[in-house]
Each structure stands twice: as C-alpha cells, then as structure tokens.
C-alpha cells in the first residue's frame, strides 16, 4: 500500500516561533488532508489540499503532488497549537485514507 | 457547519461484553467509515460502507466487528466480546459523493476495556 512519512516526529517550539511540518507519500494521490489532534484526542480538519496552497489564519499548507510531498506551516505559534498533526492521503492504488505517524508539537510559553 | 457526531464520547466496558458505538454522519454524505487509534499510534482504517453494504474492510475488522446503518441517519460499529486490545479511540468519518473527497471526522469515542 501507499507509504506516508511525516517529519519531524517531534517538535518543541517557543510561543511565537514558526515551523514547517513535512509529509512525503509514495504514490500519486487524489486527496490529501491535514488534521490536528488536540489533547482530548479529537481530530480537527485543517486542510483538504490535494494540490496547491491554502491558508487559514496562522496556518497554511502546500502540496506538490508531482513531487509527492506536502508541507504544513505554523506561524507565530501559540500554546493552543500543541498536539499531534497528521497527514492523510487517499490513493486509487490503496482505496482508503492512509494516515502518517504524525508530528507531536509542543509549544511552550 | 455540518459535522459528524459520535456517542458516547467515552465508554468503559468489561472484557467479553458487547459494545455499540454510534455515529451520525453528515446528512447528504454517502460513504461512511470507521477508523481506530490505539493510544500513541497512528489512525488505522477499519471499514468503509456504501449503499448499505461494506465496501472494504481491513484485516483488523474480523468477525468480532460489524457495522450497520439501522435508519437514515445513524451508523453503528458493534464489537462483540470485547478484548483488552480493543481499547482505543474509534473515529467515524463520512465523505460526500466520492470516496476520495474531503473526509469529515467525528470527535471520537474513547473505548476502554477493563
């Protein structure tokens, strides 16, 4: 099946810092989504971004489908940004949403 | 904004008991899914459901599990004879007209088997 790799696995940021999370995938995809899992375990949809760039407040994402990667940018991080960020992709070759292992982000005051 | 809702948010059950996890997908969506996340691990696909039947299931989804859409709004996951290793967060999701459009997830049910 399709492989989804996220990096880095862990990230510690000071409040106000910027960061970039990366998602690499091994096959052509039709759908790519970024999620934030908060400390209560809820999965929050951040972006549906099979290609191109989107922005939502301090967060933005870019997917370069031809090169099989996506980036999530967090600017001016806040403590509420803490949690695990998951990338998930859908490929015809796999037929379901495949999640990466996530990036654990801790933002300190 | 429409959302997927799951109940209960947390369920504790004794080993060997049956549990039913409930989900109300977004009303005009056609595809429904269950995913599972064991504590500290990645989110794993369990099963997809379309047109009142299972479209695909993973090897995790054995005879212990079943899904049902008992009416026009609910989508349920039943686990018969729960085991300790069934303890996990269970997420329901739905997509609209095509399986690879944006998936919307519920807030999850945390199942603890004791």
Image (cartoon, coloured by chain):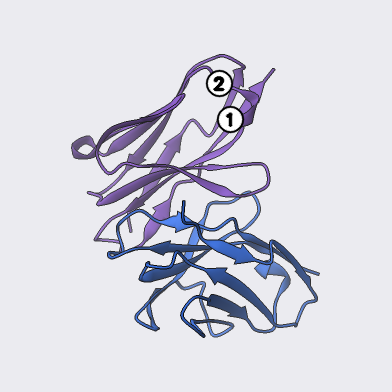
The residue located at (51%, 75%) in the rendering is B75
Please give the chain letter of the residue carrying mark 2. Answer: A
For the residue carrying disc 1, how many other residues have a C-alpha within 10 Å: few (<14), some (14-19), or many (20+)?
many
Q: Chain of mark 1?
A: A
Farthest-out residue, left? A66
Is residue A73 something one can see in this rendering? no
How far apart marks 2 and 1 lie (CA) works out to 6 Å
Q: Chain in blue?
A: B
State the image coordinates of residue B112 (x, y, percent, origin top left): 74, 65
Q: Quarter holding the C terminus of chain B?
A: bottom right
Could you tell me which residue is drawn at 37 percent across and 69 percent down?
B31
* Residue A96 in the image: above or below residue B40: below
Q: Is residue A15 above or below residue B53?
A: above
Chain A display color: purple
List x then y, in percent, for residue B110: 68, 61
Picture layout, residue B42 above or below residue B30: above
Q: Is residue B4 left or right of residue A50?
A: right
Contact, CB < 8 Å: mark 2 with mark 1?
A: yes
Using the rendered view, name the quadrant where residue B57 is placed.
bottom left
Q: Which residue is mark 1?
A: A81
Closest to the observer: A89 or A8? A89
Residue A77 bears which disc, if any? Answer: 2
Relative image position of residue B99 (x, y in whole percent): 31, 64
């Amino acid at each position: 099946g399709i492989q989804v790799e996220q990096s880095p696995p862990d990230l510690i940021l000071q409040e106000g810092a910027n960061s970039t999370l990366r998602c690499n995938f091994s096959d052509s995809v039709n759908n790519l989504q970024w999620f934030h899992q908060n400390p209560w375990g809820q999965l929050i949809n951040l972006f549906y971004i099979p290609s191109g760039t989107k922005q939502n407040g301090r967060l933005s994402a870019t997917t370069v489908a031809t090169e099989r990667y996506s980036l999530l940018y967090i600017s001016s991080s806040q403590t509420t940004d803490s949690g695990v960020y998951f990338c998930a992709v859908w490929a015809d070759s796999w037929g379901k949403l495949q999640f990466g292992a996530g990036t654990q982000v801790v933002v300190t005051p | 904004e429409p959302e997927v809702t799951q109940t209960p948010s947390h369920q504790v059950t004794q080993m060997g008991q049956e549990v039913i996890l409930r989900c109300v997908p977004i009303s005009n969506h056609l595809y429904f899914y269950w995913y599972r996340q064991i504590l500290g691990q990645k989110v794993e696909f369990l099963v997809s459901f379309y047109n009142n039947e299972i479209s695909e299931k993973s090897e995790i989804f054995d005879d212990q599990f079943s899904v049902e859409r008992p009416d026009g709004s609910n989508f349920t996951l039943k686990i018969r004879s729960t085991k300790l290793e069934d303890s996990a967060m269970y997420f329901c999701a739905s997509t609209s007209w095509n399986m690879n459009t944006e998936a919307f997830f519920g807030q999850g049910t945390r199942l603890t088997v004791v």
